[in-house]
Image (tube, helix red, strand yellow):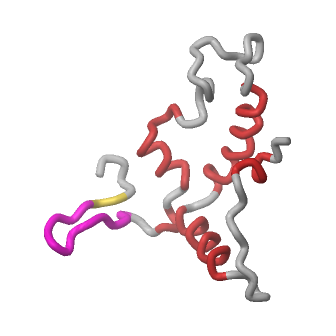
Amino acid sequence: MKHGIAESHKGINGGFALKRQASKIMLIEVIQAIDGDVFLEGCVLGFEKCSSGNPCPLHDYWKQAKEILSIPIQTKSVGAFSTLLEQKMKGNEHGVKMPIPEQSEMLKIA
């Protein structure tokens, strides 16, 4: 595939596989391969002239969400994310499953 993240294999046993180790592929690379460089850019409601001087109703929330989201997707690898997800799905050391938080909990929007 053109972004050097995955490769495809044809046939009955075909499918997709990572071209590099999951620990060497950052989440932002996957997002950019799918959505291009426009991820987290622009107005969340699609308004062309949304800005700090002319904000849409969700502008400040989207700005906060972008700041929160940009750090882990730029600093975490696919491998690290996979490990974290596995841990959350299996449960912590006490055997308690840790549900993935709802979006509103992550952003702490009242």
* Displayed quadrant of residue 40: top right
Left/right of residue 94 with respect to residue 83 in the rendered view: right
Residue at left offset 35%, top offset 59%: 6
Spot occupied by residue 62 in the image (x, y as percentages of width and height):
71, 33
Magenta stretch bounds: 8-19
Q: Residue furthest left?
A: 11
Q: Nearer the viewer, residue 94 or 9?
A: 94
Quadrant of image for the C terminus: top right
Residue at left offset 49%, top offset 47%: 31
Where 94 sits versus 109, above or below?
Answer: below
Residue at left offset 21%, top offset 69%: 14
Spot occupied by residue 97 in the image (x, y as percentages of width and height):
71, 78
The question of residue 57 being in magenta is answered with no
Spot occupied by residue 82 in the image (x, y as percentages of width and height):
56, 69
Spot occupied by residue 1 in the image (x, y as percentages of width and height):
29, 52
The question of residue 15 being in magenta is answered with yes
Count of numbered badges drawn on the protein: 0
Residue at left offset 20%, top offset 74%: 13
Left/right of residue 79 with respect to residue 1 in the rendered view: right
